[in-house]
Amino acid sequence: MIPEPAPRHSLVIPAYNEEARITPLLESITEFDGELIIVCDGTDRTAEIVKTISARRTDLIIRCLEFDHRLGKGGGVRAGLAVARAPLVGYFDADGSTTLGEMLRLFSSLDSADGAIGSRWVPGSNLTVRQGWMRRMESRGFNLIMRILYGLPYHDTQCGAKVFRKTAVDAVLSSMVSNGFEFDVELLWRLRSAGYTIIEVPIEWQNKGDSRVKKRDMIGMLSGLLRVRLHRGRA
Ligand SMILES: Nc1nc2c(ncn2[C@@H]2O[C@H](COP(=O)(O)OP(=O)(O)O[C@H]3O[C@H](CO)[C@@H](O)[C@H](O)[C@@H]3O)[C@@H](O)[C@H]2O)c(=O)[nH]1
């Protein structure tokens, strides 16, 4: 049997109880030279919907990873990245806050770096629907703390659109401990500490609302990051 060629890109979509938003996102993708890995660990019909679309859309490679317990956003992304087969990998949110076109633009900037993160807070970005001022302040404050605590020079560590060379991700993934929304910061920190270059790229972003991020997740995110920094010390 001739082995299937590896896809060019792997994109992970963490999808926790996304039955209302996953169909429009997948249907908006008309062409993609790669695989989509949807990580479903919720309690609604997301996985069932993904499998139905996957069977019908023979023009796309859609893989559905199913879990019977909640992994957290970070845990979900990690599970997806671990089985990604392409040399260029990444992840973005299920809510359609950014588009596949923007993800392809991020991929194309990997010519000059090992990782590229979408940023809503650098010149050239386009926020078509702005976040409320409270969430914006929290985001700015969070990034400031990350600059101080982790020495990360980025303006938007939490944007859900990120791409990397698979070799870079593979080098750090097994040391990662974060499962929640703090995953992104730990990943960036470990990659930078291992000498990989990551650039920040302006992105087009539409805030969709109906966030799964609750107050307790924010507290969990900060305390998780303090724990990683204090107890693990070095990457
Ligand atoms: N598999 C899985 N996915 C999850 C989980 N929790 C959240 N997600 C997924 O993570 C993505 C982001 O969650 P949203 O509910 O859309 O929250 P948001 O407020 O719009 O998220 C923004 O802030 C987060 C925290 O800073 C960011 O991580 C996120 O990328 C985005 O910028 C969605 O695709 C959602 O399904 C989980 O436990 N498991």
Image (tube, helix red, strand yellow):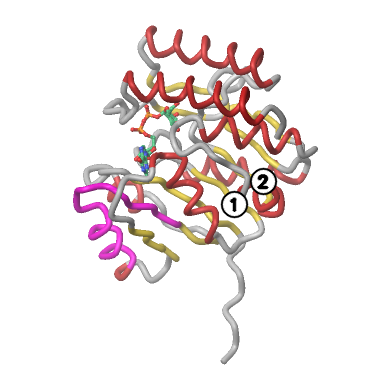
Q: Residue furthest bottom?
A: 1
Location of the C terminus by quadrant is top right
Residue pictured at 30% horizontal, 69% vertical: 56
Q: Secondary structure at mark 2?
A: helix
Q: Is residue 7 above or below residue 189?
A: below
Q: Do labels 2 and 1 touch, CB within 8 Å? A: no
**Earlier-in-chain disc, 2 versus 1:** 1
Q: Position of residue 181 (x, y in %)?
A: 45, 31
Label 2 sits on what residue type?
Val
Q: Check disc 1: other Cα within 10 Å, few if <14, some if 14-19, many if 20+.
A: many
- Residue identified by numbered label 1: 89
Question: Ligand 1, what quadrant?
Answer: top left
Residue pictured at 43% horizontal, 47% vertical: 76
Q: Position of residue 19 (x, y in %)?
A: 23, 47
- The magenta-colored residue range is 37-54
Front position in the image: 197 or 219? 219
Label 1 sits on what residue type?
Val
Tell me, yes or no, whether the highlighted magenta stretch contains residue 45. Answer: yes
The quarter of the picture where residue 34 lies is: bottom right
Residue pictured at 48% horizontal, 15% vertical: 139
Q: Position of residue 229 (x, y in %)?
A: 62, 25
Front position in the image: 59 or 224? 224
Q: Position of residue 50 (x, y in %)?
A: 30, 58
Q: Is residue 217 above or below residue 11?
A: above
Location of the N terminus by quadrant is bottom right
